[in-house]
Image (spheres, grey):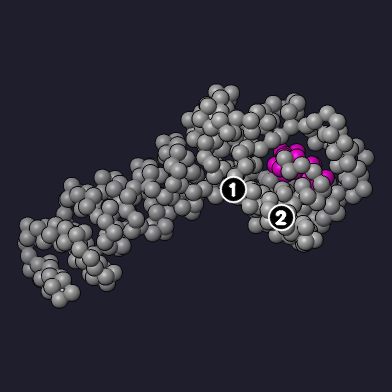
């Protein structure tokens, strides 16, 4: 501790009195000592302040070298690391953005929002990339960035992020394949991906993931409705949701308020399982009804359960692309919902269940006299 303090005081004097050459030598010496040693966060901060001052006037090549040294060090000072990460020169920023574990999410998000595509590409290759960062990458990133982060198993995506990936994968078979191979993709979004994917992409996914082959075959990929919607590989989250909701149902606690809570919190799995138990309908039918472009099936489900408009509205937003509905469309849906008759909607679902049992999967029925 005493030796370190003395050394840091000597560095301070070098900064104050030294010439450029001696300052540069002192900076490299301090950097090597910092990387090799064991220090408290206070000492690391002091190192960072001094090295940062010594590095202010060095050329780009030396800054890039400094960034390379600090990128893999657990002793890298936070402030200095952030400064190097936000450097406009990609040679300086790249190693820090790609490797450093001393960068906080705020700095990564700021870089993702404001820096070059090469900065974004470096971030996309990090060992782990949190949802808040990928949310920016999938919107602002170019094709190379988006393909890179989609193929990164250490990246995490929100539902919104996955929806952006699916949208951007249209016409991009490489991206569609990367997204389809992700084991964390929600089932309802997997459906949207497969429904839009080319036959070549589906075949590649079947070869790479034999376990999802049968699932792919059951997804609706033609607009004729000959094969009913089935969803992609059931994730761990889905099975957890299924168990949780089933227990609520057994205890008599699966109320409209609980369904509203699930939908309002954008918990698709929990909402779909809940509705399938309450209607009752197979969960794949409910999932398809929730995300149909024609929102009438979702209205029928809600009205059959005699739900109020706020709950129905939460269901509609949950299944809407990017969770958005225009004000005009929402008003139209509200009028349609209030015109529906509870008894008629229950009859529609009962008829659907009987026909499904007789002939197998088919398109969701529409009410002919539900008003």
Residue 321, disc: none
Looking at the image, is 119 positioned above or below residue 84?
above
Q: Quadrant of the C terminus?
A: top right
Looking at the image, is 361 positioned above or below residue 98?
above
Residue 325, visible in the rendered structure: no
Residue at the farthest bottom position: 2
- Position of 72 compared to 207: left or right? left
Of callouts 2 and 1, which one flags the residue occurring earlier in the amino acid sequence?
1
Residue at the farthest top position: 200
Give yes or no for residue 173 being in the magenta stretch.
no
Residue beneath label 1, please? 236
- Bounds of the magenta span? 285-302
Q: Position of residue 222 (x, y in %)?
A: 69, 26
Residue 158, visible in the rendered structure: yes
Residue 245, disc: 2
Q: Residue at x 38, y 47 (%)?
A: 126
């Amino acid at each position: 501790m005493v030796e370190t303090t003395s050394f840091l005081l000597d560095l301070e004097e070098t900064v104050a009195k030294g010439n450029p050459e001696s300052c540069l030598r002192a900076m490299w010496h301090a950097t090597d000592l910092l990387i090799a040693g064991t220090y408290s966060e206070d000492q690391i901060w002091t190192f960072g302040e001094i090295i940062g001052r010594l590095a202010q006037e060095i050329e780009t090549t030396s800054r890039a070298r400094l960034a390379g040294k600090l990128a893999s060090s657990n002793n890298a000072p936070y402030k200095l690391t952030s400064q190097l990460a936000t450097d406009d020169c990609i040679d300086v920023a790249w190693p820090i953005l790609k490797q450093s574990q001393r960068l906080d999410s705020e700095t990564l998000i700021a870089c993702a929002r404001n820096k070059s595509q090469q900065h974004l590409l470096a971030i996309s290759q990090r060992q782990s990339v949190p949802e808040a960062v990928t949310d920016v990458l999938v919107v602002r990133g170019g094709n190379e960035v988006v393909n890179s982060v989609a193929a990164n198993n250490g990246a995490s995506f929100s539902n919104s992020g996955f929806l952006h990936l699916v949208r951007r994968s249209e016409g991009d078979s490489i991206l569609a394949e990367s997204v389809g191979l992700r084991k964390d993709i929600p089932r309802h979004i997997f459906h949207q991906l497969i429904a839009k994917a080319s036959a070549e992409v589906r075949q590649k996914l079947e070869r790479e993931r034999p376990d999802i082959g049968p699932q792919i075959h059951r997804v609706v990929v033609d607009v004729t409705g000959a094969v009913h919607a089935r969803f992609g590989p059931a994730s761990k989250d889905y099975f957890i949701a299924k168990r949780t909701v089933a227990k609520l149902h057994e205890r008599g606690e699966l109320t409209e308020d609980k369904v509203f809570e699930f939908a309002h919190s954008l918990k698709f799995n929990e909402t779909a399982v809940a509705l399938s138990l309450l209607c009752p309908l197979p969960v794949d039918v409910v999932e398809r009804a929730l995300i149909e472009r024609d929102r009438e099936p979702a209205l029928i489900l809600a009205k059959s359960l005699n739900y109020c408009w706020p709950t129905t509205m939460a269901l509609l937003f949950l299944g809407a692309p990017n969770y958005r509905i225009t004000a005009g469309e929402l008003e139209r849906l509200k009028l349609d919902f209030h015109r529906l008759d509870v008894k008629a909607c229950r009859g529609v679902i009962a008829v659907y269940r009987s026909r499904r049992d007789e002939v197998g999967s088919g398109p969701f029925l529409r009410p002919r006299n539900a008003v």
